[in-house]
Image: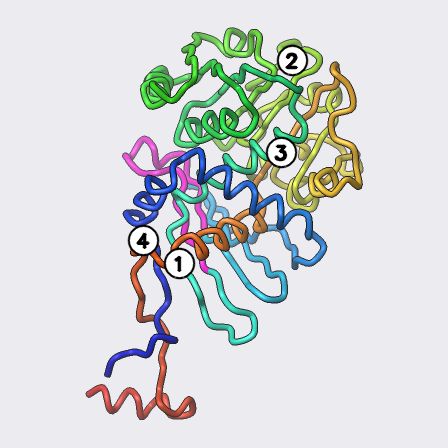
Amino acid sequence: MQPSDKALVPFVSVDNMMRLVHHIGVEQMITQIAQQIDSDFKRWESFDKTPRIPAHSPHGVIELMPTSDGEAYGFKYVNGHPKNTSEGLQTVTAFGLLADVYTGYPTLLTEMTMLTALRTAATSALVGSYLAPKNASTMAMIGNGAQSEFQCLAFKAMCGIDTVRLYDTDRNATAKCAANLQERGLTVVACQTPEDAIEGAQIITTCTADKKNATILTDNMVGPGVHINAIGGDCPGKTELHRDILLRSEIFVEYPEQTRIEGEIQALEADHPVTEIWRVMTGQAKGRTDDRQITLFDSVGFAIEDFSALRYIKNAIGGTDFYEPLDMLADPDDPRDLYGMLMRAQ
């Protein structure tokens, strides 16, 4: 018995996701995902919101990130295992699902390892477009792993940077990033120290992998007027910035209940003031207010960003062959006769 069309769920594999990215273009796709995130953040109050649901182990963390706007439901499964790199495996892998709230039926299943890199870069550059100094031209990229190229290209496409200064404790990672960014319209400078990397940078992005309290940036490294895009702190016990930097900065977050557990601000008192970035996007709160202000986006990733990315992919694959119809829903002739369907299949 062949499944009906309503029982087939579009599935976007890693291969098809890469085909879709090349079809649209990396920078264009990041920009379009950012536009979807911006649109969804501007209706923030219509979403169900909860901190992601983690399962920690000595080896890493596995998390579920769900949300719904009342019409569609989405979730992402994602892991974070820094030790994987030494074993030839990805630090982060992910997949996601979108469903129709009215029927409960899934409407999309997709890989999200590649998609998470795209949506993380899209979120970073989107927030940068609200908070970074005007006419910023140089970004320091500290941590040159799997996210780094996406971040650099996102800030080029959306914030107009033309120079990136790269640093990683692993010089092979920096060489990899520099090679991947060749002929992408950026001046790429490989640096020997983090101090060298931030020289002349108006935007500083930190994206390191080790899940520990670290001081990637010390207080004396951060001068007035910069925007810090801190995306590496993403679990309890992991930070990248010296506490004094936080005390000098205007801090912007996605969802405070989650960020206080997992972000840089876990190092601060629980009542330390922060601004939810959706309020800046809707004009309810101020972003950057002067040229000397230090703005800090303490980003840990939030489910609405994944929801936006899932909605984007669902629309983008329409009328294309960048997906496979997946037979994953039982569809008996009589909805009450699941057993009969099983017996007839014999």
Name which residue type carries label 1. Gly
Q: Position of residue 254 (x, y in %)?
A: 65, 41
Relative to residue 236, is residue 249 drawn left or right? right
Residue tagged 3: 127
Compared to 8, does 154 lie above or below? above
Q: Is residue 183 visible?
A: yes
Work out which quarter of the rendered image holds the C terminus and state it: bottom left
Query: Which of label 1 and label 3 is nearer to you?
Result: 1
Looking at the picture, how far across and down is residue 83, in whole percent?
Answer: 38, 34
Q: Amino acid at mark 2?
A: Val
Q: Residue 58: in sight, yes or no?
A: no
Q: Residue at x 70, y 33 (%)?
A: 252
Q: Is residue 76 above or below residue 7?
A: above
First reached walking from the N terminus: tag 1 or tag 3: 3
Distance from disc 3 to disc 4, alpha carbons, whole Å, reads: 30 Å
Q: Quadrant of the N terminus?
A: bottom left
In terms of sequence position, does the residue under pointer 3 or pointer 4 come before the other? 3
Q: CA distance from mark 1 to mark 3?
A: 29 Å
Identify residue for label 4. Answer: 322
Residue position marked by numbered label 1 in the rendering: 318
Which mark lies nearer to you, 2 or 1?
Answer: 1
Q: Are marks 4 and 1 in contact (CB under 8 Å)?
A: no
What secondary structure is marked by label 3? helix
Image height of 267 relative to 101, above or below: above
Give the magenta part as a residue range. Answer: 78-97
Q: Which residue is mark 2?
A: 222
- What amino acid type is highlighted by mark number 4? Phe
- Residue 324 position, x and y percent, is 29, 61
